[in-house]
Image (tube, rainbow, N blue to C red):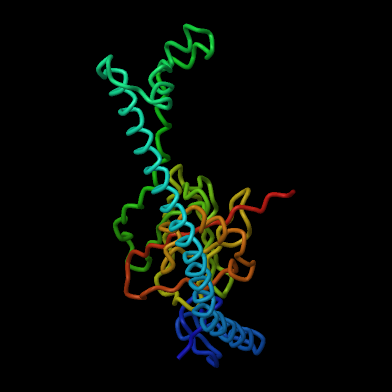
Amino acid sequence: MPTVPCPGCQKDLTLDQEVCQHCRRPRDEFEIEEGRERVRQAALRRQERPRRMLRVAVLILTLGGAAFAGWTQRAQLVSRVQKAKMDFAAEVERTRNLNGRDPGAVVGPAEGLASSKPAVTASSAVALGTAPASAAATTPAPPAPVPDVVAATPPSPPSSTSERRLYGIVYDLVTKKPIKSAVVHFENNSGMHWQTTTDALGQYQLDIYRHFSPSVLTTRVSAPGYRNGHIEDQFTGFYEQSEKTRLRLAAEITDDELEPVPFDFVESADVLERNLVLVPEKKRK
């Protein structure tokens, strides 16, 4: 049976209960009707959640198919480049053999031209003045890859048995970098709210009252430079998608898919993990 929190002590009440049995506070008709409306809205959001997740999953699968086609073309191109390199190496080896062959051997026109051309190296090009001095320098090493987001370590349960602990990571959908100082906000249907900010690793941790059910708790995340709302990285695996897929998803995701949804969880859990993904704002042309 759905319940609503008492405006006085926050204990669960039935929809039509006029007096709280704990604090003895009465409820007027307006509060009773408001509680019914909140329960109806929470039920509608729960029904909409699977459809929204399905739309996002279908979008990811569509983008993944396009990415697979791109990977196939890239593999064919790499194969052709490797073959060209092998042919070039074979030609270089053949030229070297011609340079060291017997002086009395007959050399064809093409072979004579190939053997008469001196090999030009980076150092000889610098000496002749046909290449800048930097050409002989050692090629710099490629930059180190950006480290992945570090998974949040599960914290210990809260000391109070009347609370549960929420934690997770907030990161950028496109770059996968953790977002520092993002505001993570939780609110129930009676207007009570809790908020915290992420640290340098994009991690957050917050304790809330344990008696709140999943249907009355919603999540909001905000940070400068990002669109309003967020995506929950719970079932869809945004982090494992390719950069091209994530860029297309960031461009095609709608505002409706970024609206807050009920914070779904198992009510017996003491510690809950929820990773949240923000979408960068679209650049103005």
Q: Is residue 153 left or right of residue 219?
A: left
Query: Is residue 5 placed above or below 132 in the rendered structure?
Result: below
Q: Is residue 31 above or below residue 177?
A: below
Q: Residue 263: where, in percent of width, then height?
A: 47, 71
- Farthest right residue in view: 285
Image-based side of 168 in relation to 270, left or right: right
Q: Position of residue 82 (x, y in %)?
A: 37, 43
Residue lying at 60% horizontally and 65% vertically, measured from the top left? 253
Residue 121 in percent (x, y) is at: 41, 16
Tally the marks.
0
Position of 123 compared to 195: left or right?
Answer: left
Visible residue check, residue 121: no
At which x and y percent is residue 108? 38, 26
Between 252 and 91, which is closer to the camera in this rendering? 91
Closer-to-camera residue (86/39): 86
In this view, the residue in front, 259 or 73, is: 73
Q: Quadrant of residue 234?
A: bottom left
Q: Residue furthest top?
A: 127
Q: Which residue sits at x=36%, y=75%?
A: 266
Give the residue displayed 53% in from the left and 91% down from the top.
17
Residue 112 seen in the current view: yes
Query: Given the current orientation, which residue lies at the most extreme left position?
Result: 102
> What is the quadrant of the N terminus in the image?
bottom left
| Front in this rendered view, residue 81 or 99 | 99
Q: Is residue 2 above or below residue 113?
A: below
In the picture, measured across the screen, residue 37 lies left or right of residue 180, that is: right
Q: Residue at x 41, y 17 (%)?
A: 116
